[in-house]
Image (cartoon, helix red, strand yellow):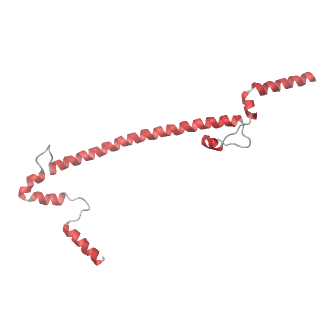
Amino acid sequence: MIEKLLIVLCVATMAILGCGSLIDNFTPAEVSRVAADYGEVELDGITTLKNAKQVRVGIAIKHRNVQTNLRREAEDDSFLHGVANQFIDTSISEAETLQSIVIGSPENPYSLLGLLAPLGLGGIIGKTYMKRKGDFSPEEHEAEIVKAKNGD
């Protein structure tokens, strides 16, 4: 009977001391709530070394995922930044070309308005077509002032 008890005791001792994961289940450890929340690990009751190791793995996984997402966002932003710059550079180039044709530039001494100015048409065309959207003509401006004074 004592031999059987010694055998059981030896087997239990070997199992407890020999198996690290089994020991981790019984070794108490303090795990902070901040670390568990960041690692997205639920802790119930008494925390053990096994729980602490699970939290460490959770923290590593979450950190890797966050860093990967940040890299992806940075790559997407760089791509969109480049595309947006290409579009705006094209728009500016086209507008400068139009301005060069209509008004003239150092590279283009001839301008449409300059050629039509002696005929008086340059001023009329310039006044009509170079007006920005939303600008008021003098007549429209006076009408708006009168309307505002009358309270319409």
Q: Is residue 93 left or right of residue 119?
A: right
Q: Is residue 60 left or right of residue 138?
A: right
Q: Quadrant of the C terminus?
A: bottom left
Q: Quadrant of the N terminus?
A: top right
User: How many numbered marks have been drawn onto this rendered protein structure?
Assistant: 0
Residue placed at 71% from the left, 37% from the top? 29
Residue placed at 21% from the left, 47% from the top? 96
Q: Please determine whether, in this image, residue 56 is positioned above or below residue 88.
A: above
Q: Please determine whether, in this image, residue 123 is positioned above or below residue 44.
A: below
Residue 47, percent across and down? 72, 39
Residue 37, percent across and down? 62, 44
Q: Name the quadrant containing residue 59.
A: top right
Residue 128, percent across and down? 17, 60
Q: Residue furthest left?
A: 118
Residue 107, percent across and down? 14, 43
Q: Residue furthest bottom?
A: 150
Residue placed at 12% from the left, 51% from the top? 112
Q: Residue furthest top?
A: 3
Q: Name the quadrant containing residue 134.
A: bottom left
